Image (cartoon, rainbow, N blue to C red):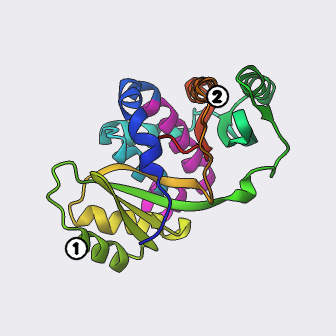
Amino acid sequence: MSGHSKWHNIQKTKGAADAKRSAVFTKIAKEIIVAVKQGGSGDPANNSRLATVVAKAKAANMPNDNIKRTIDKALGANNTDNYESVTYEGYGPCGVAVIVEALTDNRQRTAPEVRHYFDKFGGNLGAQGCVSWSFDRKGVIVIDNEDEELDEDTVMMDALEAGAEDMQSEGTVFEVTTDPESFAEVHKALEAKGYTFVSAEVEMVPQNYITLTSEEDVKMMEKLLSYLEDNDDVQNVWHNWQQD
């Protein structure tokens, strides 16, 4: 079945992501706090946004105790965390489209930092909507098949029966795409089937990709992504660079 190739873009950086597991957990905890506060409930069954973040947390191997503590913290009367969701859009080298999603308690700090990264590494920050029109918001569930024990037809049948829109094989993983609204339900159904996930979250999926041929452009793009992802306020970075 047709679709995009998100796994192709993340597999080369998975090792680096694993090495930054603590930072990843911190960012997910921030998302949990926002989801609880905005959804008004600490129960994923009654808070769809929280259910989505919990699915992401579990796929990232965040311990259940950490998840529960974070939810309890968000529900606490003394919790004063107040994060604002902000999205920045711009271009990397050679016009690579980049979307930066942030949760910040200080726009005056975050915006200049993000702009600086774009300017420093061969890109430029654009106006709201300048690149998001070329992305689709989709639930993306990457199922681990490293042992190659899963049958593709069975996975496809399970995914479609769970309500997924699409499924494709990408090397040692199966990539399932869903409508954002049904993401949590599909994830829960596949989890009940016993599947193990490499990642699971609602993403901005590019409609097309750009390949960088210059070694210098590749280096600049890698640095831009690295600096953005290392920023404490930045939650997600989506782009349409097709990494070879």
Q: Where is the N terminus found, in terms of image quarters?
A: bottom left
Q: Indicate left or right for 53 with 117 as reference.
A: left
On residue 154, the disc is: 1
Q: Which residue is at 31% across, 42% downward?
A: 64
Hey, which quadrant is residue 96 in on the image?
Answer: top right
Residue 5 % position (x, y): 47, 54
Q: Which residue is at 61% across, 60% downward?
A: 137
Magenta span includes 48: yes
What is the chief secondary structure element of the magenta stretch?
Answer: helix
Query: Earlier along the polypeptide chain: callout 2 or callout 1?
Result: 1
Q: Is residue 184 above or below residue 129?
A: below
Q: Is residue 142 above or below residue 236?
A: below
Magenta span includes 139: no
Q: Secondary structure at mark 1?
A: helix
Q: Indicate left or right for 46 with 126 as reference.
A: left
Which range of residues does the magenta coloring cover? 24-51
Residue 226 % position (x, y): 56, 25
On residue 217, the disc is: 2
